[in-house]
Structures are given as structure tokens and as C-alpha cells.
Image (cartoon, grey):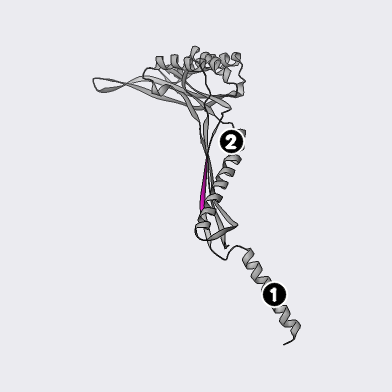
């Protein structure tokens, strides 16, 4: 066989082997999961309100609710909020009942509207709570949360910390097997989550009246708390001998 042909076949074979090794499909693989937990400052105070109207008919209940809503909205605008900061989260009208001697009887209708207010000005929380309660709204809870912009910022940071953690674990596994860590083969999954901090919750108080008094006190003494950001990442690395 011609020497040039033999040399060509050898070169093609060498290139094929190098290409195969470069794909990361050959050799042993190690998997690892990394996690990160960050405590970060919130940039939003989120106030959840309930507005409730009662009436003998559904339309009467709705009319009473509308009066309460108009009063609350005007008071909030005067307190310094923009109209687009006042968002309706839910609305429904339903038949109410009461029990007399174990017999259920109709008790008119209830119209309920849930409102969410977000503000980055924590000092404004007192005015929001006072204006809402004084005009007939009920404060359900107050949260400290992260805006979408901050969530995206901390997501990058948390996932990077989780990636570093995963790599350290993979390196430790490789060392225990008498090998060193090679190329990153794949990222199997990435998870990011954060939990708003519940600063105030009326539900934990037995009396609604006491709950609203406590809501005002909580707003006066507003004290932003850190929220926890968590991330998890699962990766696979190729192993190579020392």
C-alpha cells in the first residue's frame, strides 16, 4: 500500500480519536449538586387588604363595597400612592348564612375585594395602613419582598454560589477516586426560590378589631427583615486521571 495512503489513514484515525475524547462522551462521569442560601435586604413592602360589603341583595353588597373602595382609593392617593400601585387581586360575591338552633338560614350577601399595594418606600407603610383601616379596609398581612429586578439580580448571584458549591463537591469526589476533575459535561437542573418575609398577619390574632390595632402599631414600628434566597444546581463533570 502506498505510504502516503497509510499516513493519511493514520492521521484520520488520530483526528477521530481526539474528536471523540473532546466530546466528553468517553470516560467516567461524576455528578454533584450544589446549594446556596443568601439573606438579602428586601426592596418592597407589600400590604394585602380586604374590602367587605354587606347587603340583603348581591347588588346592595356590591354598592356598599364600591363605597368602601372609593374611600380607600382616595385616601391612598392622598397619602402619596400612584393609582397603578393599587391592584385588585380578587373579587367575589356570595350568599351569607347564619345558624339558629342548628338550622341554616340566609343572611344576605357579602361582596369581597382583595387589594395588594406595593411600595419601595418603607416609611410610607404607616400612611398606607392608616388610610386603609380608617376608610373601612382590613389589613390581612404585610410582607417584605423582592421586586422582579432584585429577584433577577440575586438569582444570578445565588446560582453562581450554588455552581461553586457543586464544583467543590465534584472535586472532592474525584480526589477520593484518585482522579482529577475534567470538563463540565452538562448542567442537569437549576432551581431558584425565595420566600417573602411575613412581617404582620392578622390571621394569627383572634379578634379582628385587635388585629387592625396591631396592624397600625406594626406599620408605625416598621422594621424591614431580610428575606432568604436559595438556589440549587445539579452538574456532571468528566473525570480524568492524575
Q: Pinpoint residue 6: horizontal percent, then vertical percent.
A: 71, 82
Q: Residue at x 60, y 33 (%)?
A: 150
Position of residue 164 in the picture relative to residue 108 (left or right): right
Instruction: Write the residue at 41% across / 19% down.
Output: 57
Disc 2 is placed on an element classified as helix
18 relative position to 72: left or right: right
Residue at 74%, 84% (x, y): give it: 3
User: Which numbered disc covers residue 151?
Assistant: 2
Question: How far, Cα to Cα, is label 1 from label 2?
Answer: 51 Å
* Callout 1 secondary element: helix
* Residue 70 image offset from top left, x and y in percent: 54, 16
State which mark lies toward you, 1 or 2. Answer: 1
- Considering the image in quadrants, where does the N terminus appear? bottom right
What residue is shown with label 1?
12
Q: Which residues are magenta?
A: 32-38
Residue 35: where, in percent of width, then height? Answer: 51, 44
Is residue 100 or residue 196 the one in the foreground?
196
In this rendering, position of residue 106 left or right of residue 57 = left
Of residues 24 and 55, the one drawn nearer to the viewer in this rendering: 24
Query: In the current view of this chain or complex, which residue is farthest to the bottom?
Result: 1
| In this view, 177 is above or below 38 | below
Amino acid at each position: 500500500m502506498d505510504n502516503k495512503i497509510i499516513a493519511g489513514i493514520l492521521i484520520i484515525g488520530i483526528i477521530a480519536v481526539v474528536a471523540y475524547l473532546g466530546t466528553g462522551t468517553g470516560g467516567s462521569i461524576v455528578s454533584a449538586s450544589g446549594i446556596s442560601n443568601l439573606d438579602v435586604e428586601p426592596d418592597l413592602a407589600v400590604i394585602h387588604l380586604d374590602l367587605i360589603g354587606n347587603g340583603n341583595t348581591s347588588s346592595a353588597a356590591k354598592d356598599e363595597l364600591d363605597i368602601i373602595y372609593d374611600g380607600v382609593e382616595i385616601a391612598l392617593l392622598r397619602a402619596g400612592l400612584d393609582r397603578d400601585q393599587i391592584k385588585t387581586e380578587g373579587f367575589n360575591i356570595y350568599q351569607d348564612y347564619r345558624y339558629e338552633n342548628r338550622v341554616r338560614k340566609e343572611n344576605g350577601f357579602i361582596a369581597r375585594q382583595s387589594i395588594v399595594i406595593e411600595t419601595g418606600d418603607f416609611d410610607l407603610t404607616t400612611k398606607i395602613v392608616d388610610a386603609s383601616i380608617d376608610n373601612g379596609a382590613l389589613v390581612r398581612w404585610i410582607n417584605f419582598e423582592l421586586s422582579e429586578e432584585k429577584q433577577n439580580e440575586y438569582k444570578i448571584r445565588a446560582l453562581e454560589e450554588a455552581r461553586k458549591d457543586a464544583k467543590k463537591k465534584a472535586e472532592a469526589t474525584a480526589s477520593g477516586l484518585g482522579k482529577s476533575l475534567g470538563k463540565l459535561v452538562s448542567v442537569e437542573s437549576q432551581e431558584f426560590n425565595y420566600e417573602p418575609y411575613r412581617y404582620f398577619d392578622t390571621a394569627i390574632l383572634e379578634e379582628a378589631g385587635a388585629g387592625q390595632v396591631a396592624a397600625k402599631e406594626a406599620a408605625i414600628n416598621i422594621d424591614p427583615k431580610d428575606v432568604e434566597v436559595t438556589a440549587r444546581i445539579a452538574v456532571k463533570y468528566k473525570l480524568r486521571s492524575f
